[in-house]
Amino acid sequence: MRTVIYPGSFDPLTNGHLDVAQRAVKLFDRVIIAVAKNESKSPCFTLRERLRLVKRCVKHMPNVEVDSFDGLLVEYVEERGAQAIIRGLRAVSDFEFEFQLALMNRKLNERVETIFMMPKDTYTFLSSRIVKEIARLGGDVSAFVPPPVQAALAAWLKDVRKG
């Protein structure tokens, strides 16, 4: 069984993330969306909330699992019996950072491959950071995130405004 890990903080999950996951499903027998614990990024949503949102948004996708991990990604890849890591590339600006990560992961474990996938061109400008900023400023994020994420962002914004 060909298994790929799609790691990220997914804070929040965007339509671009979903697009990459849908492309990965066509190429692999099993896709594991691995939500990184990484509290150093000060996420808007807790790990539990991010896991719940991702699960709700991918429940229609065949052969997709949602899990979380903490620590080295290559160790998690080995633990789950995966052969590769999928990373989304939106623009050339992503490439340098992603290339460095891929080379470091290869140095740590040469058996793990990294595959770069580009989302649809309509999502190349999209990032979780931008979505959170639009939501924070009261903008409409419905074109950028699935409905469960839009509802969660509205609730998050209400909590932020309460103080």
Image (cartoon, rainbow, N blue to C red):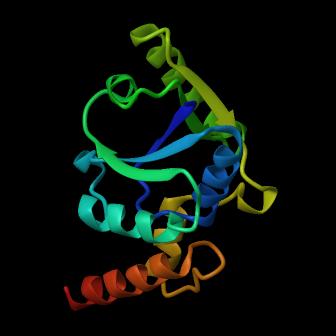
- From what the image shows, is residue 126 above or below residue 102? below
Residue 8 location (% of width, % of height)? 44, 46
Q: Quadrant of residue 81?
A: top left
- From what the image shows, is residue 140 above or below residue 96? below
In front here: 136 or 43? 43
In front here: 71 or 162? 71
Left or right, residue 60 beside residue 157? right
Residue 131 location (% of width, % of height)? 53, 69
Quadrant holding the N terminus: top right
Residue at 62 percent across and 72 percent down: it is 144
Left or right, residue 56 beside residue 116? left
Quadrant holding the C terminus: bottom left
Q: Is residue 64 visible?
A: yes
Of all residues, the one furthest to the left in this rendering is 163
Residue at 57 percent across and 30 percent down: it is 2
Please count the marks in the image. 0
- From what the image shows, is residue 62 above or below residue 1? below
Residue at 31 percent across and 59 percent down: it is 43
In front here: 18 or 141? 18
Left or right, residue 137 beside residue 72? right
Residue 38 location (% of width, % of height)? 27, 45
Of all residues, the one furthest to the right in this rendering is 121
